[in-house]
Amino acid sequence: MENRDNRDRDDREKSTAKRPEQSIENRRAEARLQRRKRVQRQRRILGIILLFVLVGIVFAAVIRFRGREDAAKNGKASNESGNLQDTEANAADSGELHLELSEADKYTGDLILVNSEYRYHVEENEELVQLVRVAEAKKGNYTVSGPEVQLAGRVMEPLERMIAACEAETGSYLSGISSAYRSVEDQQALYEEYADLYDLEYAKAYVANPGYSEHHTGLAMDLSIFYEDGSEGTFSSSAEAEWYADNSYRFGFVLRYQASKTEITGISNEEWHFRYVGIPHAYYMYEHDLCLEEYVDWLRSNTSELAPIAQACGDETYEIFFTANTSVPLPAESEYLVSGNNVDGYVIAYKRK
Ligand SMILES: [Zn+2]
């Protein structure tokens, strides 16, 4: 078609040059040709417009479908990570997301406060904690003190990223895990061992009462230094300890028992003990120098569904709030984290879009 048109035009130009006085037939033929071309051009434009409309419709359908899939996935991921026991997130007709929280949800999740006052709820967490053996699950080259060391499965990925970052940023490959999950029975044995070895006062200062240790959660770990020959060094005051104190928040961990907070936590300075709380909370606690006891109280007194606080974490911003309500509306298709505080309610963090 193109070629034919071009040829026609060439002929026409030649003939016009030769014979300026065109016959009526020629002019009519010329007009017909022009009309045909105009119609063809219009059809082509219409075709292109139709194609665009079709592509647009398909594109919109794909986005809608993906959005639904993501929303379903987010809800499921939270369930899998154990943040959302018996929790239902329904997209209501309004397009809002509704979290339905149970009594048991108060005692599970990344932010549960476990200390001498608030015990760990073993039953509520039993199925959710999903312990893994660190030595078997690990991908990194760091040392684990023994095959029995276990952590909640969901902590493995951030832990590995944190250790890898420490290695990359300090050049030291000595950090490892000396202790992590402890059952109530383990804690009982440890308490008695310390009381025998030292005295009851020492045991009280360094070992939590059975049932009241953060180590029951599977979210806490004691870091250590391991030399190449397998021997263990002293973590306190090491360059690694300093790095973890200043950087663990980037991966969702906090230095749980600082010297400056001993009066509040009831536990002496433990430079080696880190606790996973989730990225938005770790950022807030680090930036505002709050221990978990303070943070849980602060959220309760200063935030609500209607007044969340914003926390920037790198490129992302989270809205965080405490609530005691069991039915909580969230913006549609939010990516959210929910945890009980193990005291009297729930803490929700959702990513701002
Ligand atoms: Zn510890």
Image (cartoon, rainbow, N blue to C red):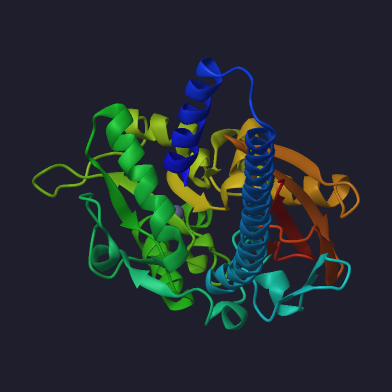
287 to 331, vertically: above or below: above
| Residue 315 place in picture, x, y as percent | 59, 35
Residue 9 sits above or below residue 111 on the image:
above
Residue 90 in picture, x, y percent from top left: 77, 75
Relative to 345, is 217 on the left or the right?
left
Residue at horizontal 55 percent and vertical 38 percent from the top: 258
Q: Nearer the viewer, residue 65 or 214?
A: 65
Above-or-below relation of 74 to 178: below
Residue 166 position in % (x across, y down): 34, 36
Q: Quadrant of residue 287?
A: top right
32 or 225: nearer the viewer? 32
For residue 314, side relative to residue 107 (left or right): left
**Residue at 70%, 74% in the rendered image:** 105
- Number of marks: 0
Question: Can residue 113 be seen by looking at this rendering?
Answer: no
In the image: residue 89, left or right of residue 198: right
**Visible residue check, residue 190:** yes
Q: Which quadrant of the structure image shows residue 183?
A: bottom left
Q: Is residue 173 left or right of residue 200?
A: left
